[in-house]
Each structure stands twice: as structure tokens, then as C-alpha cells.
Image: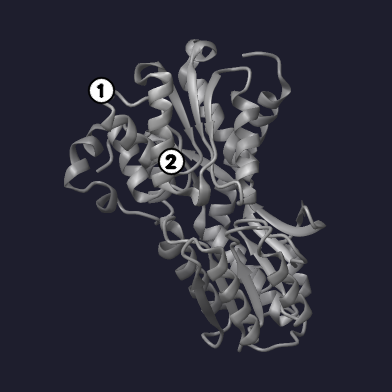
Amino acid sequence: MNARTPHTSAVRRFSIALVASASALSLAACGVVDGIGGGDSSESPNKGDDVTVGLLLPDKDTARFEKFDHPLIKKEVASLTHDKGKVVYANAESSTDKQSQQFQQMIADAVDVILVDALDSKAIAPDVQKAKDAGIPVIAYDRLAEGPIDAYVSHDNELVGEVQGRALVEDLGAKAATSKVVMMNGDPADPNTARFKKGALDELEGEVNIVKRYDTDKWSPETAKANMEKAISAVGLDNIAAVYSANDGMAGAVIDALKESGASKIPPVTGQDANLDAVQRIVAGEQFMTVYKSFLLEATNAAKMAVFKAQGRTIQFDALTQDSVDSPTQDGIPAQLVSVVPLTKSNIKQTVIQDGVYTVKDICTAEYKADCAAIGLN
């Protein structure tokens, strides 16, 4: 390891992430997080429980949005409003034009607050401004949108990249300096991509030889697979020591390309989101790791922020937004950044199973039964 400071910083931040994530999950399990700004507050809301939250999610290719984020937000809004509030949901299905139309429809329908995971952070700015002009607060969810947003809730996205990059460097060990690594980044229109990339490069540059780098429009697995095939052709299958993949969807496509090219052993491949198929690939030894981001904490706290903002519960809202971030169009945005955890074979029980994301039965289907048994997952 060289003397560059980002590694020391990353280790410190990674340690903090593990502690913070464990603490946050424990608090959620004990109901402490739910206690923030509950109905017992002396603050008088300027709107009752009849809150309508508009929820705009970007695509259906990322499994978490349909399976976790939407139902978790819907459930929490109902809980906070004694089943009187509702969530109006729309998915852009990877179309920026469609997301804009959905956003404008929610403005026309006069929802009380909008939670938006922007497919294109810059393109969404005029719609955010229209909502502002209509008096509808906008909270950026998972990705930081441009325009006059009221708050942002996501994960520490730079730390995500650091965790991924550090995992590869540590696995390559003494061979790292001479190892050829392919870098499969996400969609350049997604503001999180730059943060993932920065974190990863802080760990990878100067430690490994990054021979190919690709940006992946709309996080498309098909595009990632085509780019991986190009990398294999240019670098040589046996010369690729590892692949940095920014998320699980692309990781699956990268692994497919490696298999179809005749790889007898898959080199370390990173991921993000802890998709079920990715966890199964990890169990089988095909994918090296993924980054687990607590959907429970992100989604439920986003719902709290939306309801509290719509009801005018300033104290409760401020309690959830004690971080601060800047966008290209706005400084000092109130934010909540949820920590992340690297997921490998060794901690599947302590992460996605313990948190109720998946059961052992979900993961250990017939195809993976023997692999599960080999790591004590039964």
C-alpha cells in the first residue's frame, strides 16, 4: 500500500459505517427511530393525516425499487397517518420523458409532497422548479436531483465506491500492483455515479492497473455486457484480474460475459444493492461482494421526511436531516445519509437475513442448496 491518505480516510469511514449501520438498525428494531417526532409532539401540524405523497422511481431493472422501496414507503406513510395518508406511485421505466410527464401530473394533481429518485438529475430540474412554484415540496430520494429541492435522503455514496474498491485491492493482495482491472461505472446522468466512481478511484488508482473504463447508459445490463465483451477482446480473458462493477445488475451481466468467453474461474467482481440474484452469486462464488444498503432505513426515513414536511412538523423534519449536501444548483441541502455495509459470504446472516430482506429459503433454492450448506447457510 502506498502512503496516499484516502486509504486511511476510507478505513476510518468504513469503520464508522459498520458501527453506524449496526446502531441504526438496532435503533430501528427497538422503535427508537420511529419515535422521532411521533404523534406525541407538542408541535401543531398545519395539515392533518390526509397527506398525499407522490413517489417517482426511475426504473424496474433495479430490483429493489419495486420489491422494497415502494412498499416500504407506502407502509410507513400509512403508519404515520393512521392509514389516512396515501402514496401515489409512478415508475419512469428508464425514460426521462416519462418521468417528467409523471412529475408534472403529480403537480397537476396537487399532491402534498413529492419524493423523486431522478433518472436524470439535471433534466428533472425544471419539474422541481414547477413544483416549487406550485408550493409543493420536493425531496430527492436515493439520487440528488438539481433544482430547488427541500431535502435529500440517500446513502454515503462515496463510501459505497470506497468499500467496493478497497474490497478488490485487499482481495488481490500482493498481486494488486500488477493486476489488470476493468471498471464498469454507472450512468453518467445519475449524480450518484460520480460519487461511486470517486470513492472507488480513491482506492484503486495507484494500487491496480485500470486497463478499461466504461460508463453505462441508464445502468443497462445489456450495455455492460457488451462493454465487458469489448474489454475481454482487448485485454484478454486470462489477463483480467478483477472487475469493478458499480451495481449488481451490471455485475450479473459482466459475469455472464466472462462465462460465455470461457472463464473457468470468475475473477473478483463487485456489486451494489444486494439483489437476491447477486446474493446467490456470492453464495456460489461467482460474485465477490456487493454493497448492502439498508432499504428499511432509507425508505422509512424518506417517508417520515415527506409526511413531516407536508404536515409542517419542522422539529421532526430537522431531526431527520442533520447532514448537508450541495448540488450543482443549490448549496446546504438538508440531508440524511444512511451508512452502508459490504456483503460477502461471511456476513449474509448478519445483514440481509437478519434484517428480513431475504430468508434462507429465498436464497438457498435447489440450485444453491449445496453452496449454502458449504458456508453454513441453512
Where is residue 50 shown, x and y percent of the image? 61, 89
Three-letter code, disc 1: Ser
Where is residue 356 shown, x and y percent of the image? 39, 56
| Position of residue 63 in the picture relative to residue 33 (left or right) | left
Above or below for 35 versus 87: above
Above or below for 325 versus 347: below
Query: Which residue occupies the foreground of this view, 89 or 46?
Result: 89
Quick one: label 1, few (<14), some, or many (20+) residues within 10 Å? few
- Hey, which quadrant is residue 43 in on the image? bottom right
Above or below for 88 versus 171: below
Residue at 50% across, 67% down: 92
Q: Residue furthest left?
A: 366
Residue at 68% across, 79% down: 40
Residue at 61% across, 51% down: 189
Quick one: label 2, few (<14), some, or many (20+) residues within 10 Å? many
Residue at 25% across, 52% down: 361
| Position of residue 145 in the picture relative to residue 287 (left or right) | right
Q: Secondary structure at mark 2?
A: helix
Colour convention of the picture: one colour
Return the mark for residue 224.
2
Where is residue 302 shown, x and y percent of the image? 61, 66
- Hey, which quadrant is residue 44 in on the image? bottom right
The answer, for residue 288, to whether it is visible in the render is: no
Quadrant where the C terminus is found in the figure: top left
Q: Secondary structure at mark 1?
A: loop
Q: Are marks 1 and 2 in contact (CB under 8 Å)?
A: no
Quadrant where the N terminus is found in the figure: top right
Three-letter code, disc 2: Ala
Q: Which residue is mark 1?
A: 264
Chain-order first, disc 1 or disc 2: 2
| Position of residue 256 in the picture relative to residue 196 (left or right) | left
Query: Which residue occupies the foreground of this view, 97 or 258?
Result: 97
